[in-house]
Image: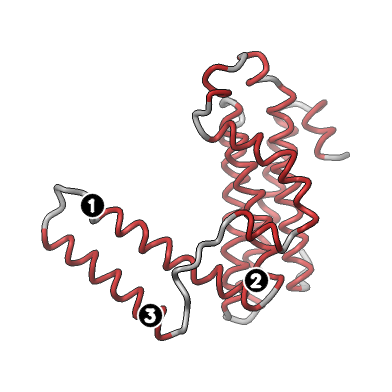
Amino acid sequence: MRVKDIVESGSKDDVLKILKQYEDSLIKLASEIRQSKPNDEKHFLLYNLTVCSANQLKGLRLVYDLPTEFYAWIARNLFELNLTVRYILSSPENLVKFGSKRARDEIEMLKGMLKFEEMDEDMAKTIESRIDRLNQSAEKHKRILKERLSINELLKESTNMQREYNIFYKLYSKYVHPTSWLVNGPQDVIYSSEIRNTCLVNAQLYAGNIAKLILDETEISI
């Protein structure tokens, strides 16, 4: 039976059961990556992407009775995770670029914290020291932190996902932000079972495809 069939005709328990099965499969895959693959950057990133995808599916189970916004948020996250897996597997350069983005993300957050007016001097010095260490580490390992990694750049390496983006990504975005559509649109349409189920089915399909991409790359059998 297809995921779509279970969502449309199955019970709540049926849906939660298949979500848990997907989640458990990803957790098992992550464990296999850690135990059987080299401790290099590629497998470190694939492990983390697998765990993050499993966490998204766990979230989908936990928000089952909540409004459509939560489904759209998780579907969008899994779509981006899917693109990211494709991106890092497309070239060694892209793998390095995504791995380097972690330091850039942290620096951006820390710089934001420094704007907090009530922060004491010692805490500010600690944060500035951390920023310096991140920059020094990037320089030592010849990592470029200035480049952004946008959704459009991810899509460049996944041309077969462009149609998916055109159809669904903007739909998800209308729900994960307090857009005029979400605030002022007709409630019976905003919270229709059709949109909710679309997000639910797509989230599972993205997660399943993430597992396939990583299984194919690592040649792991689970």
Q: Which mark is residue 33?
A: 2
Residue name at image x 61 percent, y 73 percent: 95
Please identify, in this view, whether the residue under mark 1 or under mark 2 is nearer the observer. Answer: 1
Q: Residue at x 69, y 35 (%)?
A: 199
In the image, 63: left or right of 11? left
Q: Which mark is residue 115?
A: 1
- Foreground label between 2 and 3: 3
Q: CA distance from mark 1 to mark 2?
A: 40 Å
Q: Secondary structure at mark 1?
A: loop
Residue at left 82%, top 26%? Answer: 9
Q: Is residue 78 above or below residue 68?
A: below
The amino acid on which the numbered mark 1 sits, given as a three-letter code, is Lys
Where, quadrant-wise, is the C terminus in this rendering? bottom right
Left/right of residue 107 with respect to residue 38 in the rendered view: left
Q: Secondary structure at mark 2?
A: helix
Q: Position of residue 207 (x, y in %)?
A: 70, 51
Point out the tag, 1 or 2, that comes first from the N-terminus: 2
